[in-house]
């Protein structure tokens, strides 16, 4: 599926086929109050020491006339998040110690656990967006057959993938607090609630 979706993404970018215009995109974004959760360091997954995980429910309308993955692509790109990918959420516990991540749900639904083995289990569906600060553990527990997410990352930061091991944990404790805040909210842009939430949690960074 990943290879096919990679090809589709490139074709859609080149041709505009099933991809929204900027005017269309603006009308597809829906108001959504952020749902936040903070997670403690559990000794294997550091989670973020200051910034909460953010969930926007039903933040994006996904009409049948457009490719839902292309709508998320266009939205993240317009808000200066990049390196998009399409596919499943890994079913094993992992986190990123040098970059934040957003997941836009394009199709289907999934049960995900955020914050590590002692974290919180959530059900997400098409139209939802999950913003995962560096260090925050995440994995899919179950997913519907048609499930697809679109992932993206801020322009500042370096992608890595860490496991809940003592070796990765020791390094991540040092790198996670240094990851800068993104300049824009991946869903709502420069005035999005994400920036306000993270600014209040750490006004000096």
Image: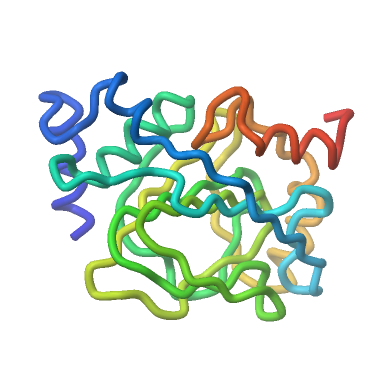
Question: Where 184 falls versus 38 (above or below)?
Answer: above
Q: Position of residue 74 (x, y in %)?
A: 33, 31
Q: Decide if residue 205 is on the left or right side of residue 88.
A: right
Q: Position of residue 182 (x, y in %)?
A: 63, 31
Foreground of the two, 65 or 85: 65
Residue 98 in which image quadrant: top right
Q: Residue at x 45, y 65 (%)?
A: 124
Q: Residue at x 83, y 49 (%)?
A: 50
Foreground of the two, 184 or 127: 127
Question: Where 190 falls versus 154 (above or below)?
Answer: above
Name the outermost residue toward the right: 204
Q: Decide if residue 38 is on the left or right side of residue 108.
A: right
Foreground of the two, 143 or 135: 143
Colour scheme used in the picture?
rainbow
Q: Residue at x 57, y 39 (%)?
A: 158
Name the outermost residue toward the top: 23
Q: Position of residue 41 (x, y in %)?
A: 81, 67
Dividing the image into 4 quarters, which one contains the C terminus?
top right
Foreground of the two, 81 or 127: 127
Q: Residue at x 61, y 46 (%)?
A: 33
Question: Where 123 falls versus 129 (above or below)?
Answer: below
Count of marks placed on residues: 0
Q: Position of residue 88 (x, y in %)?
A: 34, 63
Residue 38 in which image quadrant: bottom right
Residue 119 in which image quadrant: bottom right
Q: Decide if residue 26 is on the left or right side of residue 135.
A: left
Dividing the image into 4 quarters, which one contains the N terminus?
bottom left
């Amino acid at each position: 599926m990943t290879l096919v979706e990679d090809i589709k993404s490139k074709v859609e970018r080149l041709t505009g086929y099933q991809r929204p215009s900027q005017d269309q995109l603006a009308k597809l974004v829906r108001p959504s109050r952020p749902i936040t959760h903070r997670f403690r360091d559990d000794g294997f997954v550091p989670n973020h020491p200051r910034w909460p995980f953010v969930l926007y429910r039903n933040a994006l309308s996904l009409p049948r006339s457009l490719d839902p993955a292309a709508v998320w692509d266009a939205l993240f790109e317009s808000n200066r998040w990049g390196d998009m990918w399409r596919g499943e959420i890994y079913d094993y516990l992992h986190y990123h110690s040098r970059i934040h991540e957003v997941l836009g749900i394009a199709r289907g639904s999934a049960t995900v656990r955020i914050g590590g083995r002692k974290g919180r289990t959530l059900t997400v569906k098409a139209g939802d967006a999950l913003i995962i600060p560096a260090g925050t553990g995440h994995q899919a527990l179950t997913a519907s057959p048609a499930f697809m997410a679109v992932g993206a990352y801020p322009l500042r930061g370096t992608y890595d993938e860490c496991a809940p091991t003592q070796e990765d944990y020791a390094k991540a404790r040092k790198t996670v607090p240094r990851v800068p805040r993104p300049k824009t909210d991946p869903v709502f842009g420069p005035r999005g609630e994400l920036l306000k939430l993270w600014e209040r949690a750490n006004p000096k960074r």
